[in-house]
Image (tube, helix red, strand yellow):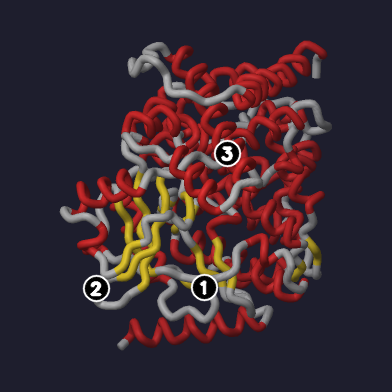
């Protein structure tokens, strides 16, 4: 790689970090004019500045809360609440818009990212102020026809969690069901659509650095997936499909949706209580291994068995109950596949893992568009680059996914100065494979942090339907018994 290209790559990371991180050090204040910046470049600059200001301001207030008494904490919290749609649009334009979403999606990839990019993404991950109780209640009333204290037997005006484009409130239905109500920030849909209008600029710069990347269809695919996430009706439908697919499963749980209390901007579902990821990290290694196996099985059984992929493998989207039982949350970013779309993945697994036929594997990679057929790389170079992604399931043995493996997986996508930089820049991401890369960029980062240990080849043999291997663990036997019961039910 030339020195000029190295400088360009480093400069891009530094520019992103400077634009976001430096802005975060300034005090946030509402703009004097509500007129939105119209140009694409102006919008990008505004987003970076507002995102940093909003996040930095809220972080400063959180620090102040540590030294405040109870009354003062309430005063500080109320002072930071967003009370109008205009404030939401300004403060959350990037903090809860597309850039915030991208920051959330990449926040746990720290170990494989260059330092300037890690710092920038960390700034995008700052918590933004919540909506005021009145504003949140107004959204519920506008969507469901009555204020929440009328619709529900009990309503907690203080949000219990922040979602990517909304916040979650605890409530009790009039028939006694505990529920989680996700309320979308007013105006965030316009903010995200505006952010996505600038996505071409980002991918245009990436094309200069990675000539093999066909940016236009990739941008279109990511745009479609993110816009779908704005519609909670679509998310509710996705969640229902997953809940039905895993109904009565012994260790995989998906909360049920309450359709009568859900709309395009309000999503009400069963409230589940469990341990968060940070708490799981304090449990025994045996418990972490069971949780990791459940996550692995959920991802790959959903993909190959149900032809659905929940594209948000994120630490915040799991609740853990011990013994490998896991509740899976957040179904806004879901990709549904046809058998024809999944066929290339199966072909690549057959060629590389089952037959270890490098020549055939390369032909498949070139045919599906991951690598152009005229690239001057040897078969050994192609095998050296792509083989890493199959290393876990290549051998029939117990192995541990550690942070080093997860970091190397990320570097294969982003480190243009590393030993695989030339082939990385020549590689492409076809649209149908864009979201599924979250397995490489998200799932393995999570499993690496858990230090997950298993015979991954035997687990993979189970979840690959065309192999249909025997159960390889206690969870595998429980899943097999459940699946047999599902088949009997369908026959009757």
Tag count: 3
x, y (%) of residue 328?
50, 64
Left of 133 or right of it: where is 410? right
Residue 315 higher or lower than 241, as above or below: above
Residue 40 higher or lower than 150, as above or below: above
SS label for mark 3: helix
Q: Is residue 6 visible?
A: yes
Pointer 1: residues within 10 angstroms few (<14), some, or many (20+)? some
Q: Nearer the viewer, mark 2 or mark 3?
A: 3
Residue 465 higher or lower than 47, as above or below: below
Viewer-proximal residue among 337 and 27: 27
Pointer 2: residues within 10 angstroms few (<14), some, or many (20+)? few
Marks 2 and 1 close (CB-CB < 8 Å):
no
In the rendering, which numbered label is found on residue 174? 2
Instruction: Calculate the distance from the C-alpha at mark 2 to the C-alpha at mark 1.
Output: 28 Å
- Give the labeled residue for mark 1: 252
SS label for mark 1: strand
- Give the labeled residue for mark 3: 61
Viewer-proximal residue among 360 and 380: 380
Instruction: Please state, as top left, top right, bottom left or bottom right, where the C terminus lies in the image.
Output: bottom left
Residue drawn at (37%, 36%) of the image: 188
x, y (%) of residue 166?
40, 46
Left of 223 or right of it: where is 389? right
Q: Is residue 212 visible?
A: no
């Amino acid at each position: 790689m030339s020195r000029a290209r190295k400088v360009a790559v480093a400069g891009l990371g530094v520019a992103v970090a400077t634009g976001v991180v430096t802005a975060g050090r300034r005090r946030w204040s509402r703009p004097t004019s509500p007129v939105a910046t119209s140009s694409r470049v102006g919008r990008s600059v505004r987003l970076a500045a507002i995102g940093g200001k909003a996040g930095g301001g809220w972080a400063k207030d959180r620090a102040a809360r540590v030294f405040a008494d109870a009354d003062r904490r309430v005063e500080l919290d109320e002072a930071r609440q967003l009370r109008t749609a205009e404030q939401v649009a300004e403060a959350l334009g990037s903090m809860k818009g597309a850039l915030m979403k991208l920051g959330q999606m990449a926040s746990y990839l720290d170990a494989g990212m260059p330092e300037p990019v890690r710092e920038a993404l960390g700034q995008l991950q700052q918590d933004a102020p919540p909506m005021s109780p009145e504003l949140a209640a107004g959204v519920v009333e506008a969507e469901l026809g009555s204020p929440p204290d009328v619709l529900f037997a009990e309503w907690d005006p203080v949000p219990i969690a922040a979602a990517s484009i909304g916040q979650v409130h605890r409530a009790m239905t009039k028939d006694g069901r505990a529920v989680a109500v996700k309320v979308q920030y007013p105006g965030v849909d316009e903010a995200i659509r505006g952010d996505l209008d600038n996505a071409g600029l980002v991918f245009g710069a990436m094309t200069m650095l990675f000539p093999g990347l066909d940016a236009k269809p990739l941008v279109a695919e990511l745009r479609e997936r993110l816009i779908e996430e704005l519609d909670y009706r679509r998310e509710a439908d996705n969640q229902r499909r997953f809940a039905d697919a895993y109904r009565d499963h012994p260790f995989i749980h998906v909360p049920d949706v309450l359709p009568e209390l859900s709309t395009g901007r309000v999503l009400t579902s069963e409230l589940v209580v469990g341990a968060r990821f940070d708490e799981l990290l304090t449990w025994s290694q045996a418990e972490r291994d069971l949780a990791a196996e459940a996550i692995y099985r959920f991802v790959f059984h959903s993909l190959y068995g149900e032809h659905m992929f929940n594209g948000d493998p994120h630490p915040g989207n799991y609740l853990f109950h011990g013994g490998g039982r896991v509740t899976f949350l957040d179904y806004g970013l879901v990709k549904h596949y046809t058998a024809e779309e999944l066929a290339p993945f199966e072909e690549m697994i057959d060629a590389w893992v089952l037959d270890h036929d490098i020549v055939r594997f390369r032909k498949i990679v070139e045919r599906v568009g991951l690598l152009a057929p005229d690239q001057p790389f040897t078969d050994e170079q192609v095998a050296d680059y792509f083989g890493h992604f199959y290393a876990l399931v290549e051998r029939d043995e117990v192995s541990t996914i550690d942070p080093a493996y997860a970091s190397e997986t990320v570097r294969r996508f982003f480190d243009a100065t590393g030993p695989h930089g030339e082939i990385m820049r020549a590689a492409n991401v076809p649209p149908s494979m864009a979201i599924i890369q979250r397995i490489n960029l998200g799932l393995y980062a999570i499993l690496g942090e858990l230090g997950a240990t298993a015979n991954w080849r035997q687990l993979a043999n189970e979840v690959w339907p065309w192999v249909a291997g025997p159960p390889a663990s206690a969870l595998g036997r429980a899943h097999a018994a459940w699946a047999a019961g599902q088949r009997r039910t369908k026959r009757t």
